[in-house]
Amino acid sequence: MNIHEYGFASAPVVLIQPIGDHNTDGIEAEYNLIKELSEVEFRLLAVTVDSWNEDLSPWTAPAVFGKEGFGDGAEAFLDTVLQLCTDPGKTYCIGGYSLAGLFALWASCRIDVFRGVAAASPSVWFPGFTQYLKEQGMKSRAVYLSLGDREERTRNPVMATVGTCIRETQEIFKQQGAECELEWNPGNHFQEPDVRMAKAWAWVLGKMLKMLGIH
């Protein structure tokens, strides 16, 4: 498990974010932007994922672009993540971009460990996912969602459902009693992921400040 650590070990809030090898160059810029946007002291643990489509997928699904399908490695990867969440004196939050955002939402329905969720441009088009959310229920009380305003404008019939799915996801979480923000960013899926994640984390940290009195 390769972890990129930022911030201070003494920070009361720990942000956990799965990243791919393609994200490592932007994670420090993301950390610095979170510091600019938030007043809360935090520690960021960026966990490198070995196999993006395998480790972050809650169940198998056929490929929707290219030839690589989706595995069912999320349960095993969650066990790895939970090894970072053993201090009862810390507040843990989870988040991610794209399929890592989907994993964060899935994990926060799966277990009651994460107080906040930051899901920027999450892959909520994933087959069967919104039904899972309805059945399992969100266990975090603060959930941030975002999407680029051009992401649903694609010829791919599965991925084109992302706009409908993320609106439905917000309504599901609200009905389940979670405070859920949905922000629309300009551009497509690949535009400024570090900025989008920083905004997501800043919102979550703000909610932790209000909910838990963390400074």
Image: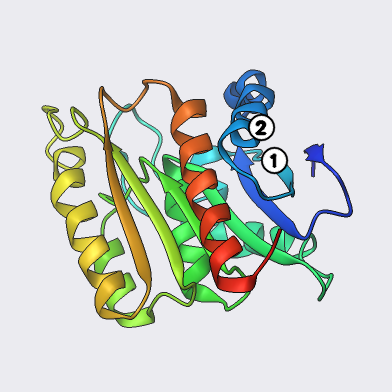
Q: Which residue is more in the foreground, 17 or 208?
A: 208
Identify the residue position indicated by label 1 in the image.
46
Q: Is residue 73 left or right of residue 57?
A: right
Tell me residue 120's x, y (percent).
41, 42
What SS does tag 1 mark?
strand
- For the question of whether residue 100 can be seen, the reply is no
Crowding near pointer 2: few (<14 within 10 Å), some, many (20+)? Answer: many
Tell me residue 158's x, y (percent).
17, 43
- For the question of whether residue 162 can be seen, the reply is yes
Precedes in sequence: disc 2 or disc 1: 2
What SS does tag 2 mark?
helix
Crowding near pointer 1: few (<14 within 10 Å), some, many (20+)? Answer: many
Identify the residue position indicated by label 2 in the image.
31
Q: Is residue 63 left or right of residue 153?
A: right
Q: Quadrant of the N terminus?
A: top right
Tell me residue 206's x, y (percent).
53, 55
Q: Is residue 70 left or right of residue 46?
A: left
